[in-house]
Image (cartoon, rainbow, N blue to C red):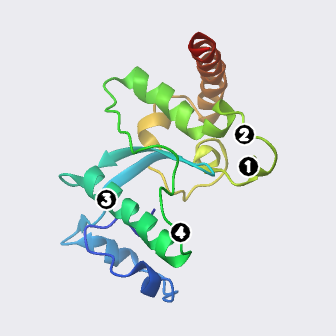
Amino acid sequence: MNEFNSIKPIGSIYENSFHKDKKSELDDLIDGESRKLVNFICYCLNPNHYHFILEQSVDSGIEKFMHKLGGYSWFFNKKYNRSGSLFQGPFKAVHIDSNEQLLHTSVYVNLNDKVHQLGGGAAKLVNSSWEEYVGDDKSGFCDKGIILDQFQGKEKYEDFAKSSLLDIKERREMNLLLLE
């Protein structure tokens, strides 16, 4: 995700996989400004799909980032001699219109494995920003301020998230029942 999040071309994913050099933080700046296409607010990588909350850093940043990420599917299929979609379902974007929607969507994304009730081996394959939000990790990948600054401590966000998760699961179950 970090490699694709650059305004400069990334070149060959295959060739880049051989270069283990760490980029310096200066590589992320042009004239003191970020080279990043987007800021990650939250993410969840499930075995067959992913969710991101992204904030554009440059014009069309989300579109450019998703285009680069889509190129990864081509690379993966070529590398493993396969064809077809790499992730479940087509790409779908939703514009977040309100702060309330942002807060609840952050819970949906951070705890998406719980929303889908992934268990067993599938749960071990999940990678999300949840620990960044409630754990002790100070470095982190995400720009959490837009969410956490609205709560008096990580514990309050965790309480909000757990309560919101119950509502999300109830709505999801109701929608599934209505579809039967």
Badge 2 amino acid: Leu
Which residue is at a point 21% across and 55% down the rendered structure image? 58
Mark 2 vs mark 1, CA separation in Å: 6 Å
Q: Sequence order check: which comes first, mark 2 or mark 3?
A: 3
Report crowding for label 3: few under 14, some 14 to 19, many 20 or more residues within 10 A (C-alpha). Answer: few
Tell me residue 110's x, y (percent).
Answer: 58, 39
- Answer above or below: position of 42 versus 125: above
User: Are the residues at dot 2 and dot 3 in contact (C-beta closer than 8 Å)?
Assistant: no
Q: Quadrant of residue 166?
A: top right
Relative side of 17 to 12, left or right: right
User: Are the residues at dot 2 and dot 1 in contact (C-beta closer than 8 Å)?
Assistant: yes
13 or 100: which is nearer to us?
13
SS label for mark 3: helix
* Residue at image mark 3: 67
Report crowding for label 2: few under 14, some 14 to 19, many 20 or more residues within 10 A (C-alpha). Answer: some
* Residue at image mark 4: 82
* Residue at image mark 1: 122
- Answer above or below: position of 148 versus 37: above
Report crowding for label 1: few under 14, some 14 to 19, many 20 or more residues within 10 A (C-alpha). Answer: few
SS label for mark 2: loop
